[in-house]
Structure formats: C-alpha cells, structure tokens
Amino acid sequence: MRLIFLGPPGAGKGTQSERICRDYNVIQLSTGDILRANIKKGTELGKLAGMSINKGELAPDDVMIDMIKAELHAKDVLNGYILDGFPRTVPQAIALDDLLHEMDKKLDVVLIIEASTDILIKRLSSRRTCRNCGKSYHLIYNPPKHEDVCDVCSGELYQRDDDTEEPIKTRLKIYEKQTFPLIQYYINKGIAEKIDGMGEIEDIYHQVKTVLERFK
Ligand code: AMP
C-alpha cells in the first residue's frame, strides 16, 4: 500500500501514521523527521534545510525531491509506505508522479485530514517531541507516562522551535498558499479521501481504517 497523508501542520498526520504502520505493515516516511535527523547529524542536507525549518518555511523543492527519490529507492519501502509531509507543493507532486511512473508504481490513496485553525494552533503549541526518536506527544490529549521523557526510548522531550507562535503562523499561511492546492490536484486524479481530524485520536483512526481496508 502506498499512501500520502496530506493536511495542515497539527492535523495529526504523524500520530495517525504511527497507527497505520503498526497495523498495515508499511513504513512512515516523514520528510520533517528525516530533515530533523539530518540537522542533528550536521549533514549537507541538514545544512540546506536547517534555516527554513526553524523559521517555519519550506525547504527548497529540488532538495526535497532529491531526498524523496533516495528514500523511495531504498529497499525497506518495498511493502509500502506512508508519505507524511511530502509533497507540499505542486512541483513536488508532479515530481512524485514522474518518479512513481519511472518506478512503475502508483499511489493507492491520498488521505486528506482536516481540522480548524484553532485546534491546529492548540495542538502545535502543546506538542512535545522526542529528541531521540522523533515521537510526538500532546501535553493534554496524548501525554507521556513520565513528564518530559519519551515512552518508547526514554529520550528527552522538547518543544520544536517551529512549534512556537511565529513559526506556527508562518507554517499555517504556507500550508494555505502552497499545500492546500494539492487537495484539488489529488481530487482530480480520483484518489483523495477526506478525514475529519477534529475528534479524538482513536475516532479519527477509525475513519482512516475504514478507508484503508479497501486497499489491503
Ligand atoms: P513537519 O515535521 O512535517 O511539520 O515538517 C517540518 C518542516 O520541515 C517544515 O516546516 C519544512 O520546513 C520542512 N519540510 C518537511 N517536508 C517538506 C517538504 N515536503 N517540502 C519543503 N519543506 C519540508
């Protein structure tokens, strides 16, 4: 199964992707997580993307397209994957179509998860992320068992620089302008499915599963 999770920052793409990976034998390719890991390691890619990430701006399309090419050619994606955070612009979506065509593969479904701006801001500003494995928590709705400690790997939890007020505003504006048009792009292809991202995590996952059962 190959799918894309599309939606604004804070809609729950990462949280839902974790559950899909657990139940459907696919892997999550979160471009944000990959970039953050590269920044931590100080790689060339990390340097190219670092400035944009901290300000809440998008990294350049060519950098992202090269990165996703490398990821999709890796062996561990053979059973399928969830693209979480890619594509985010029309040029990225077109490059992905070309790449899949070259690889003789196609997307099964694009899940479009929607939530109101109020909810997105509340979720992002209360989000904490593991410095070590990247898992996300919400201080109220999905807290860790022990304060500031990751349940999975005991890593330290921190607030991402881009989960603070100004970068959050920038990210939401960029989403509206550059990523929102992709919804129509995938509706036109007939592979878009909308998910209401306003409720509880498990209720949202129930909707996701109802869609995914068709592609098993
Ligand atoms: P995320 O973890 O998905 O919220 O992504 C965090 C940040 O990584 C974004 O605000 C961008 O700076 C960068 N990023 C992630 N994916 C992309 C992409 N597909 N295109 C451009 N920038 C991206």
Image: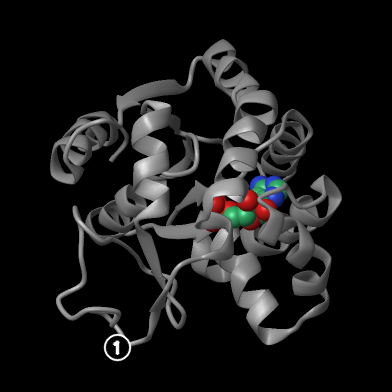
Q: Residues within 10 Å of mark 1 (few under 14, many from 20)?
A: some
173 and 166: which is toward the camera: 166
Q: Is residue 216 left or right of residue 156?
A: left
Image quarter of the N terminus: top left
Q: Is residue 80 left or right of residue 205?
A: right
The picture quadrant where one finds residue 109 is: top left
The picture quadrant where one finds residue 74 is: bottom right
Callout 1 secondary element: loop
Q: Position of residue 31 (x, y in %)?
A: 60, 57
Q: Position of residue 144 (x, y in %)?
A: 21, 72
Residue depicted at 25% across the width and 61% down the height: 139
Q: How is the image coloured?
A: one colour
Image quarter of the C terminus: top left
Q: Position of residue 195 (x, y in %)?
A: 32, 26
What amino acid type should be assigned to the residue bearing mark 1?
Answer: Ser
Q: How many marks?
A: 1
Q: Is residue 85 above or below residue 18?
A: above
Residue depicted at 26% across the width and 80% down the height: 152
The picture quadrant where one finds residue 90 is: top right
Residue designated by label 1: 154
Q: Is residue 87 visible?
A: no
Residue depicted at 75% across the width and 53% down the height: 64
Q: Position of residue 13 (x, y in %)?
A: 40, 45
3 and 161: which is toward the camera: 161
